Amino acid sequence: MSLHGARRVVRVFDRPPARGRDQQRGSQRVDVGRLCRFGHADGEDAARDLRCLVVDEVRQARPARAVSPELVALYDQRADVPVSTFVDMLTQAREHIDVLVYAAVFLHEAYPRLNDVLRERAAEGCAVRIAVGDPESTNVQERGKEERFGHGIESRCRLALMHYRPLAGVPGIEVRTHATTLYNSIYRADDQAMVNAHVWGVNAFAAPVWHLRRSGEGGMFDTYAGSFDAVWETATPVSEG
């Protein structure tokens, strides 16, 4: 085997991938037959001897799905989401409304009729479950320290409870407090959900939100719906007030 032949083989592997269809199937351009056509009697031996048959060059990558089919929209931060988006989603619910938060008083502050909407949905047969943070819990208090919000988050939990307590005892509506670590705030309406991720040291309004719509079993939507159910089982019912 000549050095000249070896260089020709190496250049085949060093070529940038072709455009179009060959870019998708670039590894097929580098095969034993091609090595043989460059003048080697035994292409496999040439490749082995030259150590140029690089695994990454030949292996076909499994096609990756760019995004989940359940992802409707992704917002950089919750402050970018119009409150009307939350309200419209809840208003359209016919079977389920689930809210898992520590406080999220922005909803009542921006839309004072929120309780009326929840009563109306419940009166139409929609099951409404609201879980807010227990202001006395260690996890809530720790969150205040992490977000450099001090005791403010505990006060906001109490304010949220004040907003939702009038709903306790309304047929079709349940209100509970929870003491879990809140990894995501979840606002679910039937097969749609707004999920507000929580980032250490960042207030919820500045953290990302993804809008999901369920498309089948076992997807992202079901993951968060299952998380809500798990927290709900640990939560304490709120008495009428």
Image (cartoon, rainbow, N blue to C red):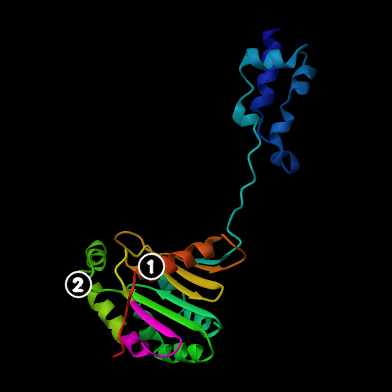
Where, by quadrant of the figure, is residue 60 drawn? top right
Q: Residue tagged by mark 2? A: 151
Tell me: residue 34, above or below residue 18. Answer: above
Q: How many marks?
A: 2
The residue carrying pointer 2 sits among few (fewer than 14), some (14 to 19) or many (20 or more) residues within 10 Å by Cα, namely some
Q: Residue tagged by mark 1? A: 231
Q: Which is more foreground, mark 1 or mark 2?
A: 1
Q: Is residue 174 magenta?
A: yes
**Residue stretch rendered in magenta on the structure:** 163-176
Where, by quadrant of the figure, is residue 36 drawn? top right
Left or right placement of residue 160 versus residue 136 in this view: right
Tell me: residue 74, above or below residue 14. Answer: below
What x and y, as percent, mark residue 3?
67, 9
> Depth check: 192 or 96 in front?
96
For residue 206, the mark is none
Residue at the image point whose x is 56% and y is 60% from the top: 219
What x and y, as percent, mark residue 171?
44, 90
